Image (cartoon, rainbow, N blue to C red):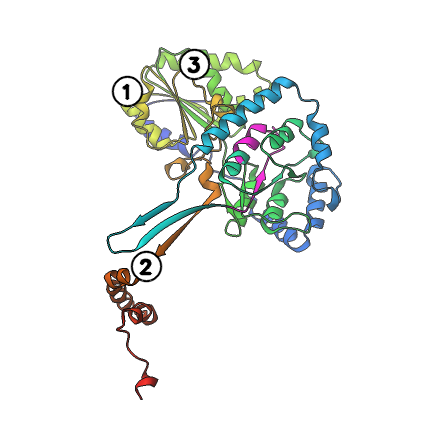
Amino acid sequence: MKRLATADADFEARFQQLLTDRDAAQDVHTPVAAIIADVRARGDAAVCDYTERFDRMAVKPDRLRIAQAEIDAATAGIAPHLMAALDVAATRIEAFHRAQLPHDLRIDDAEGLTLGMRWTALDAVGLYVPGGKAAYPSSVLMNAIPARAAGVARIAMCVPTPDGVLNPLVLAAASRAGITEIYRIGGAQAVAAMAYGTETIAGVDRIVGPGNAYVAEAKRQVFGRVGIDSIAGPSEVLILADSQQNPRHVAIDLLAQAEHDELAQAVLMTDSADFAQFVEAAVEAELPTLSRAAIAGASWRDHGATIVVRDWAEAAALANRIAPEHLQIMTGDPQAIFATIRHAGAAFLGRYCPEALGDYVAGPNHVLPTGRTARFASGLSVYDFLKRTTWIACQEAGLQAIGPAAVALAEAEGLQAHARSVAIRLGNAPLPISTLA
């Protein structure tokens, strides 16, 4: 891991390196484009071929969809305490996202026009669920429940099942979220199938959910045909912690992010050099006890960092430059520091609010902008599953009041028919030459 201090002469150069050390992406544009083209051309047959090739599972089109009986059988053996935990998470996620639902807008203005904006849900959404290094039932809830809260009528879920193995908890989460249309496919071929449709899988309007480099690239390439949530990169956390915190707590919070992926990034920012060393030692002590120690260790070694700052104003300025996916503030007055933060996907305030709480049961969404995109992007919400339609109602008096301005602007732009379509209703449009002859 890297040790930085703002007092060091080379800090700015090393900080810039920290911001960009994960920018090199795997170039999979060409193979993904080929997969998408093949699925568009051959439909189910291509999807089945790629599923056998990548997931080591032969499947026919009539077996692409997971039957309800299989879902029931897979979830029957789940321990009651896990089902109860899923329910706690789902209930809280639903409550938070239902509270986000916007209201339609109507304005009767002084000129006599009525202006409005109406919200409507998407018709169909595709949910991609990973099935590689780890399966995440929590992601099923975080992606599906906002769509349900928004009023989406159809949610189709794709989840790879390598070697034909179904993940019972993922299927249980889907059931709790009200999803019954589930397909045993993954990768770029699943994204292509949801975007363009096949004989068995009807196309959708938007695709959400995380995945590997192939899935991310496929989402990038089908954008425009369908909407997408984002092009997500490796996960990240920035923790601002003062010397009054428990070093082990901070260390475990850093490792909770590092264990996601070798490319994940965990960064501590503190005003105490001694505290930074205590946390570094705690990380090294905790690492060997983790089941994913190899992954977390590689992440911490290659991308982790501790940064010692002079004060919290300096820390906040640096945090805004990092624009982290997750921001934990563990100080005496976290609200005061949070008030100065402009760019973060989600914030977790206080020593009793680890980021992992937000991953599962707090309520706000854990699908968040990565790779500094929190500068311009937000986390998943009901708004991702809604569209806005504006509307105008105008009577004669309103047209008389504002129409001349429209005519003047249209004429200035050289759009004669535009100008005439308003002017003719004002009673002063020029007559066609044929009627003057």
Can you identify the residue that label 3 sits on? Answer: 279
Can you identify the residue that label 1 sits on? Answer: 311
Q: Is residue 334 left or right of residue 150?
A: left
Which residues are the magenta region? 122-143
Residue 169 in percent (x, y) is at 64, 26
| Residue ID at (31%, 60%) | 395
Q: Secondary structure at mark 2?
A: loop
Q: Is residue 129 magenta?
A: yes
226 or 431, nearer to the observer: 431
* Quarter of the image where one finds residue 59: top right
309 or 236, nearer to the observer: 236
The numbered mark, 2 or 3, whose residue comes first in the sequence reads: 3
Residue 289 in percent (x, y) is at 57, 13
What is the three-letter code of the residue carrying label 1? Answer: Asp
In this rendering, the answer to whether 179 lies above or below 295 is below
Residue 168 in percent (x, y) is at 67, 27
Residue farthest to the bottom, as pictured: 437
What is the three-letter code of the residue carrying label 2? Answer: Cys
Residue 284 in percent (x, y) is at 50, 14
- How packed mark 3 is, by other alpha carbons closer than 10 Å (few <14, some 14-19, many 20 or more), is many
* Quarter of the image where one finds residue 78: top right
Can you identify the residue that label 2 sits on? Answer: 394
Question: Disc 2 or disc 1, which is closer to the eye?
Answer: 2
Question: Disc 2 or disc 3, which is closer to the eye?
Answer: 2
- How packed mark 1 is, by other alpha carbons closer than 10 Å (few <14, some 14-19, many 20 or more), is few
